[in-house]
Amino acid sequence: MSNNLNDRVFVGNLLRQVRIGNCSVKEALLMYPKDTTDESLIAAYHALIHYEADEDIRRQDNLYKEEQDDYIEFLSYILSRGEDLPENIINNYKQYYDSAPILHKNTPQGFFKGFWKSLNTGFRRRKE
């Protein structure tokens, strides 16, 4: 089994644990594979962030809650099978990549990846 496949199965399980309430989004994000370049895993990471951000809306709107829960379950199902997420889902999250980067490993190299990314993001915001 390749690393990406193992990571996808792991993330699929994380999403399911969040969906059924056995794991918080914060815990899932902390356990997320570090420094991944897998587009499906990056999109799922951002889906988790959006899921957390909409928690108050889900409490007030049962239909919205059901739709978001089904969406997380759908992502979980695909990743648990080791498959790529659909291209439209991946493309929907690309606009958020700069604002919420994937966590980096706790190594000097990981630190500098995050550091340079934050400098680039801050510079880009000031320029606009």
Image: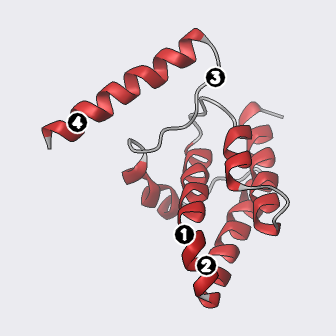
- How far is the residue under mark 1 from the one under mark 4? 26 Å
Q: Name the residue under label 1.
A: 54
Q: Mark 2 points at which residue?
A: 58
> Dot 1: few (<14), some (14–19), or many (≥20) neighbours within 10 Å?
some
| Direction from residue 91 to residue 109 in the image, left or right | right
Task: Identify the mark at residue 105; answer none if there is no mark.
Answer: 3
How many numbered dots are placed on residues in this image?
A: 4
Q: Which amino acid does label 4 sit on?
A: Arg
How many other residues sit within 10 Å of disc 4, few (<14), some (14-19) or many (≥20)?
few
> Given the image, on which type of amino acid does mark 3 rest?
Lys
Q: Which amino acid, mark 1?
A: Asp
Residue hosting label 4: 124
Q: In this view, does 78 lie above or below 5?
A: below
Side of 55 where 74 appears, left or right: right
Q: How far apart are marks 3 and 1 (CA)?
A: 27 Å
Task: Name the residue: 80% across, 55% down.
Answer: 23
User: Is disc 1 in contact with disc 2, using a CB cutoff of under 8 Å?
Assistant: yes
Task: Name which quarter of the figure residue 86 lies in.
Answer: bottom right
Q: In which quarter of the image is residue 109?
A: top right
Q: Which amino acid does label 2 sit on?
A: Arg
Q: Earlier in the sequence, mark 4 or mark 2?
A: 2
Identify the element where label 2 is drawn. Answer: helix
Q: Point out the residue furthest to the left here.
A: 127
Q: Residue at horizontal 56%, vertical 34%?
A: 37
